[in-house]
Amino acid sequence: MAAVAVRDPDAREQVGGPSEVRERLEVFAGEVLAGAMNRPVQLVNGGLYLRGLIEQGQRKSLEPLVERLGGEADYQSLQQFLADSPWDPAAVTRAVAERVAPEIGVEAWVLDDTGFPKDGKGSPGVKRQYSGTLGKIGNCQIGVSAHAVGAKGTVPLGFALYLPEEWCADGGRRTKAKIPEEVTFKTKPELGVELIERAAGWEVEAAPVLGDQAYGENTALRERLNKGGLEYVLSVGPETTVFAPGTTFAVPERPAGKGRPPSRPVPDAEPQAIGALIAGLPPEQFKTVTFRDGPDKEPVASRFCFVRVRTGNRPKKRTPWPPREEWLIAEWPAGREAPTDYWLSNLPQDTEPERLARLARLRWKIELDYKQLKGELGLDHYEGRSWLGWYHHTALVTTAHGFLTLERQNPKAPRPA
């Protein structure tokens, strides 16, 4: 097996010799692939594909991957294995997560999405759309993902391909991309919460869900997580409205001789934007909180305030009313003219400020996942035009990522003197 493509020098020192790595990879592949692949040819191709992803090479698309594997791999067989073979990518992702998560000390689950730049119009879900990866509008696919992050690493909990409405309505393009009939349009928050709910049924330690404003400002997502017994610390913008502390809700009396008596409680004050609410708080509401951003990190200190509020979204059918109480967290570093970030959280009322602050700031770790998944393992290198192929590729990249995460912690791997 060629040298393992780990660009972190410390990790490279831990992976040991090529033959040892190959043996450990074969064992790991057998553990996590066997439950989803019941045909010998699937297991063989799965192991080969993993080797191709991990071995050195700039491109991890199928053609250069097969070239690196030499005579061991057959291009047509691997192509069919990726694009059409009936094995369940979710089962592979679950096996990897259940194997890796206990080793990393899970602290949070993170929701995010990333762009996959593409040429042409044939790849499923591709269109000109905004991508944070590109930092602009470009021709790309968007993948929503969930990840478990911990003190010793990260592990993806799943990927979902965002399918724009025009794709959902285009029968011809759907047929060419082999998109199943049951796939309908879903927003990115809907895809994200489904990934979280699926992982919640696995043997993976549950943890508070983190996410940026695209997810935090989605009321339905927050309610769905809360109803499912899942905690969250989700970013929101300063225009998000809440009812200030002390707001009361009471059912008004029925006006004399007029219709049915009211049944919905009415607040005694209008909701206000959290940016204005936080700006109007007295200085003593803010405190300097110190916390560690990892086991070997130096302590981090910043000014925060923590306020119990109720969100100000308009009442809708099936939406609890009055809104439940939750935390509004704001970070306002010393010397800044305004707060830099805001979050809403359903963590218990007695949660320590240090934990709230640390979770609020922990989402950055997702960038470590994307950096390795794309930069080293070719997450965005899949060039096929098959819906299932995209899911197969992301599941196998997840497997390679999980293997390397365990390699970094392998006490039996040789280390330099």
Image (cartoon, rainbow, N blue to C red):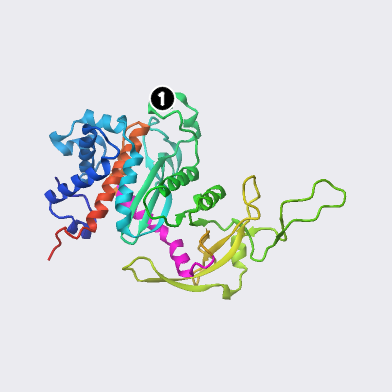
Query: Mark 1 is on which residue type?
Result: Thr
Image location of residue 269, percent across then percent down = 71, 60
Question: Which residue shows up at 14% across the image and 35% down it?
Answer: 72
Figure quadrant of residue 175: top left
Q: Give yes or no for residue 370 being in the magenta stretch.
A: yes
Q: Left of 72 or right of it: where is 220?
A: right
Q: Which residue is mark 1?
A: 175
Q: Left of 10 or right of it: where is 143?
A: right
Magenta residues, dominant SS class: helix
Tell me the quadrant of the picture where the C terminus can be found.
bottom left
Q: Is residue 36 above or below residue 353?
A: above
Q: Give yes or no for residue 324 being in the magenta stretch.
A: no
Q: Left of 136 or right of it: where is 329?
A: right
Q: Is residue 123 above or below residue 351?
A: above
Image location of residue 221, percent across then percent down = 52, 48
Question: Which residue shows up at 13% across the image and 51% down it?
Answer: 20
Tell me the quadrant of the picture where the N terminus can be found.
top left
Q: Secondary structure at mark 1?
A: helix
State the residue in front, 258 or 217.
Answer: 258
Image location of residue 409, percent across then percent down = 24, 59
Question: Which residue shows up at 49% across the image and 45% down it?
Answer: 189
Image location of residue 253, percent across then percent down = 80, 55
State the residue in front, 380 or 268.
Answer: 268
What segment carries the magenta color? 349-374
